[in-house]
Image: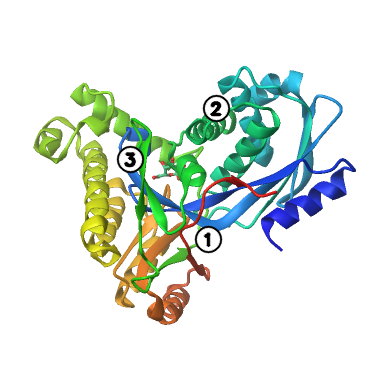
C-alpha cells in the first residue's frame, strides 16, 4: 500500500463524503548546504521517494478536521476559530496541517475556504532528518490550494509551509525543506538561492554512475523548535550584525580573516561554517556539471567536518556513521538536516551498499549505540496531485 492508498482508506473510515482528490509531497535529503538557508545562502537538496499523502473530502460546515495514520487523535477547528487556535499553540502534529491552512489563508486572501476533512498518511520516516514535516506541509498546501482555489504557485506554497513551521509550530527553520519537497525532480537535486528563491534543477546521474545515496538514520532524536538549532541561528545573526550586513550570505571566504579579528572564537567558527558551506554548495554544483557525481565526495566530507568542528551540530552516532561509510568505500558522507541527531548520508557505489550497511551496523553495536535504520533514497518528484 502506498501513502496515497492509505490516506484514501483512512478518509473513508472517517466520512461518507467522497474524496475530492489526493495530493502528496515527499521528504527530502540535503546533499549539501546545511544551516545556510536561514542565512539567505545556497542549498542543494533533493526530494526522496517517500511521501506524505493528503486525501480530502468537502464538509457541509466550516470545520477543518485533520486525522492521520501517525496519531490516534483527530483534531477539529472551525475556520472562524483558526487564528485563535494557532495563536494558542499546543496542537502537536496537527499544528502542521492546521498551520498550513492558516498560513494559506494569510498568503492567499482571495481563496475560497470551506470545511474539509483531511486524512494524512505517510511513509517518510519521522525524526530522521528527512523532513517529514515539510512532506505534511507540501501535501496539505497543495491540496488546499486546489480545493480552496487559492491559485498559489509552488514557490508560494513552499513559503506557506515555512510560515506554518515558523509561526504556527514555532520552529525557526529556513525554507530549504519546503522548496525541496515542492520542487523536486526525479534524478535531480534542487540548487536553491535562499535569498532570491531562484532554483535550478541539476541532474545527479547517480544511477548511470552506479552510485547510491545510503541513509543512516541514527534514531537519535532532535527537535528544531528548541535548543541548539535556535542557538546556532542566533550566533549567525550576531556574526552578520558584527559586519553590519543583513545576513551571512553577504560574506565570502575573503572576509574570514576579518571575521576572526572581530568575532569571539565560538561565533567565528559558526560564521566560518556558513561562509565555507555556501562556497561548498557552489563548488558541488560546478563539480557535478563538469565531472559528474563521483567528483563531489570530498566536498561532502569537508561539509561534515565543518559541521562537526565549527558548527558543532553533529553527535557521536553521526560521526561514526560517516567514518564507517568512508572506511567502507563511500566517496563522501555527511550528516544531513539540522543536526543534533537524525541521519547521515553516504554517496557510495551501489555494489558496496550491503557491505557498508553491515559495517555500520557492526560499528554501532560495538560502540553500544542503538541499532540504526539504514536504507537508500532515490532523488524523486516533488509535490503533486495523485488522484
Ligand atoms: C532543518 C530546517 C532547514 C535547514 C536545515 C539545516 O532541516 O528545517 O530549514 O535549516 O535544518 O540545513
**Residue wearing tag 3:** 36
Residue at the outermost right position: 16
Element type at mark 2: helix
Depicted 258 relative to depicted 309: above or below: above
Q: Are marks 2 and 3 in contact (CB under 8 Å)?
A: no
Mark whose residue sits in front, 2 or 1: 2
Q: Which mark is residue 219?
A: 1
Q: Is residue 288 left or right of residue 316?
A: left
Q: Disc 2 or 1, which lies upstream in sequence? A: 2
Question: Which numbered disc covers residue 112?
Answer: none
> Is 200 on the left-hand or right-hand side of 145?
left
Q: Quadrant of residue 250 in the image?
A: top left
How much space separates mark 3 and mark 1, taking CA atoms?
24 Å
Under 8 Å from ligand 1: the CB of mark 2?
A: no
Q: Which mark is residue 167?
A: 2
Rendered view: 301 above or below 78: below
Where disc 1 sits, the SS reads loop
* Total numbered labels: 3
265 sits to left or right of 65: left
Residue sitting at 53 percent across and 51 percent down? 27
Q: Mark 3 Cα within 10 Å, few/some/many (few <14, many 20+)?
A: many
Q: CA distance from mark 2 to mark 1?
A: 27 Å
The foreground one among 92 and 349 is 349
**Left or right: 171 in relation to 62:** left
Tell me, yes or no, if residue 257 can be seen here. yes
**Picture coordinates of residue 9, whole percent (x, y):** 80, 54
How is colour applied across the structure in the image?
rainbow
> Who's the residue at 45% across and 58% down the image?
379
Quadrant containing the N terminus in the rendered view: bottom right
Amino acid at each position: 500500500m502506498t501513502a496515497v492508498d492509505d490516506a484514501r482508506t483512512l478518509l473513508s473510515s472517517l466520512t461518507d463524503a467522497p474524496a475530492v482528490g489526493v495530493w502528496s509531497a515527499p521528504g527530502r535529503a540535503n546533499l549539501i548546504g546545511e544551516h545556510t538557508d536561514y542565512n539567505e545562502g545556497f542549498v542543494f537538496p533533493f526530494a526522496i521517494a517517500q511521501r506524505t499523502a493528503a486525501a480530502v473530502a468537502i464538509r457541509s460546515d466550516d470545520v477543518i478536521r485533520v486525522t492521520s495514520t501517525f496519531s490516534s487523535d483527530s483534531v477539529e477547528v472551525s475556520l472562524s476559530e483558526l487564528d485563535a487556535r494557532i495563536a494558542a499553540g499546543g496542537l502537536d502534529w496537527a499544528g502542521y496541517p492546521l498551520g498550513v491552512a492558516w498560513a494559506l489563508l494569510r498568503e492567499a486572501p482571495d481563496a475560497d475556504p470551506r470545511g474539509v476533512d483531511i486524512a494524512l498518511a505517510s511513509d517518510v520516516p519521522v525524526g530522521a532528518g528527512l523532513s517529514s514535516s515539510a512532506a505534511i506541509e507540501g501535501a496539505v498546501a497543495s491540496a488546499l490550494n486546489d480545493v480552496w482555489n487559492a491559485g498559489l504557485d509552488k514557490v508560494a506554497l513552499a513559503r506557506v509551509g515555512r510560515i506554518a513551521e515558523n509561526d504556527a509550530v514555532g520552529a525557526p527553520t529556513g525554507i530549504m525543506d519546503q522548496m525541496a519537497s515542492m520542487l523536486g525532480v526525479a534524478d535531480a537535486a534542487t540548487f536553491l538561492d535562499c535569498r532570491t528563491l531562484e532554483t535550478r534543477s541539476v541532474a545527479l546521474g547517480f544511477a548511470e554512475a552506479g552510485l547510491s545515496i545510503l541513509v543512516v538514520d541514527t534514531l537519535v532524536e532532535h527537535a528544531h523548535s528548541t535548543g541548539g538549532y535556535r542557538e546556532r541561528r542566533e550566533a549567525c545573526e550576531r556574526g552578520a550584525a558584527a559586519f553590519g550586513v543583513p545576513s551571512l550570505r553577504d560574506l565570502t571566504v575573503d572576509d574570514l580573516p576579518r571575521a576572526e579579528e572581530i568575532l569571539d572564537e565560538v561565533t567565528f567558527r559558526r560564521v566560518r561554517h556558513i561562509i565555507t558551506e555556501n562556497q561548498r554548495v557552489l563548488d558541488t554544483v560546478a563539480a557535478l556539471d563538469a565531472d559528474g557525481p563521483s567528483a563531489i565526495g570530498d566536498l561532502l566530507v569537508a561539509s561534515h567536518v565543518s559541521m562537526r568542528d565549527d558548527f558543532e551540530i553533529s553527535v557521536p552516532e553521526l560521526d561514526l556513521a560517516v567514518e564507517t561509510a568512508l572506511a567502507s568505500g563511500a566517496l563522501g558522507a555527511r550528516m544531513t538536516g539540522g543536526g543534533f541527531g537524525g541521519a547521515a548520508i553516504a554517496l557510495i557505489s551501489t555494489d558496496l551498499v550491503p557491505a557498508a550497511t553491515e559495517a555500520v551496523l557492526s560499528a554501532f553495536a560495538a560502540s553500544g549505540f542503538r541499532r540504526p535504520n539504514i536504507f537508500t533514497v532515490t532523488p524523486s518528484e516533488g509535490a503533486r496531485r495523485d488522484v
